[in-house]
Image (tube, rainbow, N blue to C red):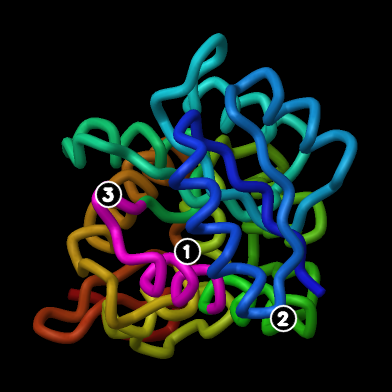
Amino acid sequence: MAKILIVDDNRQIISILSEYAKKEGYATVEALDGDEALTKFRQEAPDILLLDVMLPHTDGFTVCRKIREQSNVPIIMITARGEDFEKIMGLEIGADDYIVKPFSPGEVMARIKAILRRLRREEAQPKVFVWDNLTINWTEYTVTINNEPVSLTKKEFELLWTLAAGKDKVFSRNELLNQVWGYDYFGDSRTVDSHIKRLRAKLEGYRHDTWDIRTIWGVGYKFEVAGHDKK
């Protein structure tokens, strides 16, 4: 049984989400502020977090950053405003997804199911990918090029892993949303494009003549290796 840590300063929202989660067969743990969330996270070791941005004492962004220092547990951020900078901030610091208030509890449960399905698929994957000077270690969430560490966010790492593991396969944006974020119906293809842009910008600082991330116009992206025509 998966365990969900629900963090929100609104008791009514926690009650509704907890009720829906239990109907889906999940166990729940609750926290009303950021400090309590960090304590409950250490004590309860949840499988996934629903984390509000606006919290007393310690805000959701800070909680997310602190958890990412020690764990890659999936985190869904909840924001009341839905402003782009909050979404980008959450994804940049390692959140797996975001939901804007007001939301449908059914949609939240669908997001949770999708992420947990993705995690089950990942458990069966090989743990290390090597191509020429590139090494991606899934277990340690590390990337090196010419033995130099590359600093990537959680989603940038998972995006690079997905593309590289399927080298020369063209992935549509919807496929990448499904495999990396764990959902398709609720996805936004701009999420993929913005992450690809940031990932490429970081990789440009390293020499990678034998491989690259290529845009296939009108389709999506692929990890292209040497020996294939580039455009």
- Residue 190, compared with residue 44, is above or below; it is below
Which residue is farthest right? 43
- Of the pair 158 and 184, the residue shown nearer to us: 184
Direction from residue 87 to residue 189 in the image, left or right: left
Q: Which residue is mark 1?
A: 159
Residue found at x 76% / y 64%: 27
Quadrant in the rendering for residue 86 = top left
Q: Which residue is mark 3?
A: 100
Discs 2/3, front: 3
* Amino acid type shown at disc 2: Arg
* Amino acid type shown at disc 1: Leu
Residue found at x 34% / y 87%: 170
Which residue is farthest top? 57
- CA gap between label 2 and label 1 equals 17 Å
- Of the pair 106 and 187, the residue shown nearer to us: 106
- Of the pair 138 and 25, the residue shown nearer to us: 25
Which residue is farthest left? 218
Direction from residue 91 to residue 229 in the image, left or right: left
Q: Position of residue 157 (x, y in %)?
A: 55, 54
- CA gap between label 2 and label 3 equals 26 Å
- Of the pair 61 and 181, the residue shown nearer to us: 61
Q: Crowdedness of circle 1 by 10 Å Cα count: few (<14), some, many (20+)?
A: many
Quarter placement of the N terminus: bottom right
Q: Position of residue 121 (x, y in %)?
A: 68, 84
- CA gap between label 3 and label 1 equals 23 Å
Q: Position of residue 155 (x, y in %)?
A: 49, 53
Name the chief secondary structure element in magenta.
Answer: helix
Residue found at x 68% / y 18%: 35
Q: Position of residue 145 (x, y in %)?
A: 62, 47
In the rendered structure, which segment of residues is drawn in magenta? Answer: 99-113
Q: Which residue is mark 2?
A: 120
